[in-house]
Amino acid sequence: MNSESEAVSHVDTNKATEDNFRLLIEGITDYAIFLLDPSGYITTWNAGAARIKQYAADEIIGKHFSTFYSAEAKAAEYPAYELQEALKQGHFEDEGWRLRKDGTAFWANVVITPIYNQARELIGFAKITRDLSERKKAEDDLLKAFDEVKENEERFRQLVEGVADYAIFMLDPVGNITTWNEGARKLNGYEAHEIIGKYFAKFYSREAVEQGFPAYELQQAKQNGRFEDEGWRYRKDGSAFWANTVLTAIYDSQKQLLGFSKITRDLTERKKLEQQLYWTNQELKENEERSRLLIDSVKDYAILMLSPDGIVSSWNVGAERIKGYKAAEIIGKHFSTFYPREAIESGFPQYELRKALDQGHFEDEGWRLRKDGTAFWANVVITPIHNPARELIGFAKVTRDLTERRRNEDLMRKNNELLKINNELDNFVYAASHDLKSPIINLEGLLAALKEDLGPEGEHHSEVLTRMDGAITILKKVVSDLGDVARLQQSNGETESINLPDLLAEVTGNISELIAASNAEIIADFSGFKSLTYSRKNLRSILFNLVSNAIKYAHPQRRPQVRVKTHLASTGLYCLSVADNGLGITSNQTSKIFSLFKRAHDHVEGSGIGLYLVKKILDNSGDSIVVDSVPDKGSVFSICFKQKAS
């Protein structure tokens, strides 16, 4: 009886322990802990699994655990591999991407352990999963940052090595050269293998080395963080150059000296200019009167002296001519008087003086103002002047008026732009005049075939067919005009002496139907001159377009009247005008009517090419056309020819 009670008690205790253990596992939320049967199907599910993988217990229990794996992992049979490895090794641990219910991925640490009963028979697997996405992101961010640092270091190294205008290299803590860039090779003449490992004193004169100046530079850079100097340095071939050098101490994060960076710039040309200016100044001081007379006589340059603060202290004839001030009006004033308000407010005059002091001279181009307020484009050179004791005594300022050059450059740029546009337009016109011929011929053939097919029925569609005929006729006229424009690109035509009355009669004969239909009156006055040396076909095209336009754009309430007249201008030009009493042109249209496909009135049929063709012909021959028009009164087109009459 006692042993039966003990057995029951033992069973109850085990059951209570199992219940407590089950409650403990189910209450864990940071880990997904669940059991799989021997085939990998889920048999239990805890709160952590629900939180991490988003499935409720009734949604996932009975499903295979490969549900959490990507399609690629399933195709590779990776879930089965994990169970095999767990059986073989006693447990299996892995990290990788797993999938939640909503399809999002998370980085998981997975441990799978096989579970056996007392008879060592496999009854399933315990699977513990932990979400390590935050740790994975931190690791990835750290790796990315490390890669960026390495990339920036490599980019900086390539940048420094590629600089050709500055010698940039590194020294170790005792002054031996450890790196060498292209600028250093170009400036000093040494290849990298010839100089790396050598003491940097090789670039200094014997006297500087004996005085310990290179070591002094290192000491000053170490003590003050950097050291800057200008002086003579020497190349591999023994030639000297005037160098600006900056030596900077480089420390690690522990404040341990790693070495020095050294940047050298060749300022030989600037030094030569300074020396020339210095000796010029000395000569000027030796014979001040002669120099003053020389400068005062210069008219093309404004040459003046400024005090160290920028106050004008001398004034020459060129300055008076360019800037408009008399000497008595400007001496004693600050040189910012010549600058626009925006430049003064931004402190640009003071900036010029600072740069001149820092660099030995300053050169600039920009707008300056004359006494009368007009602006001119100036080239300005400012040079600091020092006495023999190297004390600043002022600045020399030389100004040249480059307004005309600036204007010519602007005009040249605009002309180039217009030339490019005209060339593109000419190419389009040439292509269009050729490419449209075949489609028009096809249209004419198709319309003729349509009329033939319609037979007597065509009379019911006569209005539409007539419109189609008219449209094709207009299109043929446009293509013909485009062809004329295209041919103008090749030649202006041979010139000959042309009788103007005969030519006008030929033109009016060609448009006799238009004249008769509109009852137009053509009035000719060739009292100025009757003949002209020009290309006959081009002059005929000019008259044809101007006269026919004058009739087409007639005022509906009065009879069209076209006056063709010649006269000799006082400038010696031969002028021909075509005047009408038609609709006229508004002022905002007069500048556009000579453009391709531009028309002042849309109610009259036309291609918008005629006046463009006229303008093109005259431009090619170096002649001109202008229009003077009053809306509802009429227009006058005036052409002036440089060619002389026969």
Image (cartoon, rainbow, N blue to C red):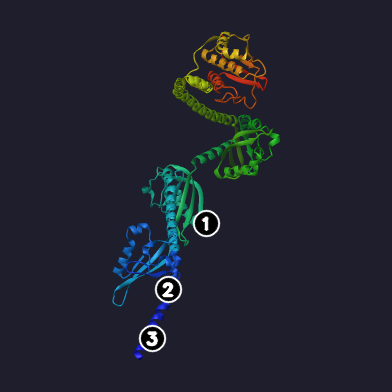
* Amino acid identity at mark 3: Ser
* Amino acid identity at mark 1: Asn
Question: Do the numbered discs 2 and 3 sit on residues whose CB atoms are within 8 Å?
Answer: no
Based on the displayed image, in which of its 4 quarters is residue 124 positioned?
bottom left
Gap between marks 2 and 1 measured at Cα: 66 Å
Q: Position of residue 532 (x, y in %)?
A: 56, 11
The residue identified by callout 3 is 9
The residue identified by callout 2 is 25
Q: Position of residue 240 (x, y in %)?
A: 45, 43
Closer to the eye: label 2 or 3: 3
Q: Left or right of 286: which side holds 151?
A: left
Judged from this view, the residue extending furthest toward the right is: 329
Question: Do the numbered discs 2 and 1 sit on residues whose CB atoms are within 8 Å?
Answer: no
The residue identified by callout 1 is 224
* Amino acid identity at mark 2: Ile
Are there few (<14), some (14-19), or many (20+) residues within 10 Å of tag 1? few
Q: Where is residue 615 in the image (x, y as percent from the top left)?
A: 56, 21
Q: Front-most of 328 and 293? A: 328
Callout 1: SS = helix
Closer to the eye: label 3 or 1: 3
Judged from this view, the residue extending furthest toward the front is: 456
